[in-house]
Image (tube, rainbow, N blue to C red):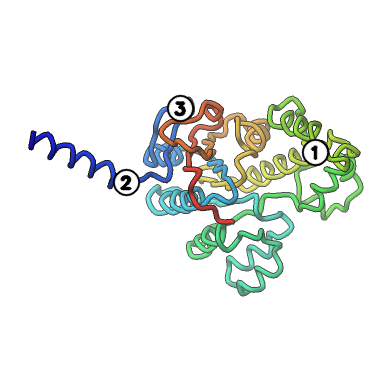
Amino acid sequence: MKNILTLIIIITSLSVNAQKLAYKIFEKGGKLSSYEDLYNSAVKQDVIMFGELHDDAIVHWLQYELTADLHKKSGRTLILGAEMFEADNQTILDEYLQGKIKERNFIDDARLWSNYKTDYRALVEFAKENKLPFIATNIPRRYAAMVNSDGFEALANISDQAKQWMTPLPPKYNPELTSYKKMLEMMNSSTGAGMKSRNMENFPKAQAIKDATMAHFILKNFEKGKLFVHYHGAYHSDDYEGIIWYLKEENKNLKIVSISVSRQEDISKLDEKYLNKADFIIVVSDSMTKTY
C-alpha cells in the first residue's frame, strides 16, 4: 500500500508540474510534426510562404527564428519580403536598411502598420544587420481601395509611375478560387446597409490585386539558387490559393512551402477544418497572449 501511495504521489506531481505547450506544428493532413521538420523542408525550397495571424506572438517569434536559422545554418542566401510594406515605400525601406536614414524617419515616412514595433521590427532589423534585401511586396492601399470601390477598371487611368507599384494590368483573376468565393459570400451575408449598397463583386477583387501584386514582386526579386521568405496574413496563401495561385500561374516549377496558423483550445491534434490549409500548420493555444 505504501508503494502504491508513493506512485500516486509521483504521478500527481508529474501531472501538476508538466510543461504547458504554447504551440504544436502539424503537417498537411494532420500528422504531428516539428520545428526541425519545418526547417528541413523550408531549406529545400525556392519560396517560403509564411502565413500568419497578425496579432499572434508565437508565429511572429517563429518567423524570426526560422529566418535566423536559415541565414545562419543553411548556406542559402535569403531575400525577405512582406505584405506589411507597400511597394511605393521600397526606396524608404532600402534607405533605412542601408543606414542612409534614421529609424525615426523611416517610421514617420513608410506608413508602417500599427504593430510594426512589436511584430515586424525584429525582422527588418535582422535584414539590416545582415545586409539582406527586404522587399516591399504589397500594392499601395489607396489603389486596393480603388479596386474595392470600382473594380480593376478603376486602375486603367492611373499614372505609369503608379503602375510600377503593382502587378501588370489588367491582372489575371479567377473568381472561382475558394478564398475569393468565401469573401464574396461573407459580404453578401452582411446585414449592413452600407455594405449592401456597394458592388460586392469588387471585394474579392481587392484581395486579388494584393495577391497578384505580392506574387509579382516575389517573382521580380527572386533569384535562382536563393531563398525568398515572404511574410503575410495566412488568408493570402491558405489552401494553396491567393499569392501561391499567382506564383504558379507564372512559374509552375517554383518550389514553394506554405505555412499557416490556427488557434485552438486543444492543441493536441489539428482541427479538421485546417487539415489541408498548408504544408505546415502551426497550432497555437487560444489562451496565448496576443500582441494587440
First of labels 2, 3 by sequence position? 2
User: Of residues 185 and 9, which is closer to you in this image?
Assistant: 9
Mark 3 Cα-neighbour bin, 10 Å: few <14, some 14–19, many ≥20: some
What kind of element bears circle 3?
Answer: loop
Residue 14 picture location, percent across and down = 24, 43
Q: Is residue 175 left or right of residue 243?
A: right
Spatial CA span between label 2 and label 1? 44 Å
Residue 155 picture location, percent across and down = 87, 45
Q: State whether residue 8 is above or below residue 17.
A: above
Write down the residue under mark 1.
Answer: 203
What kind of element bears circle 2?
Answer: loop
First of labels 3, 1 by sequence position? 3
Residue type, mark 1 in image: Phe
Residue 286 picture location, percent across and down = 51, 43
Residue type, mark 2 in image: Gln
Residue 176 picture location, percent across and down = 74, 25
Write down the residue under mark 3.
Answer: 30
Q: Quadrant of residue 40?
A: top left
State the residue at coordinates (39%, 31%).
32
Q: State whether residue 147 is above or below residue 273.
A: below
Write down the residue under mark 2.
Answer: 19
Q: Quadrant of residue 4?
A: top left
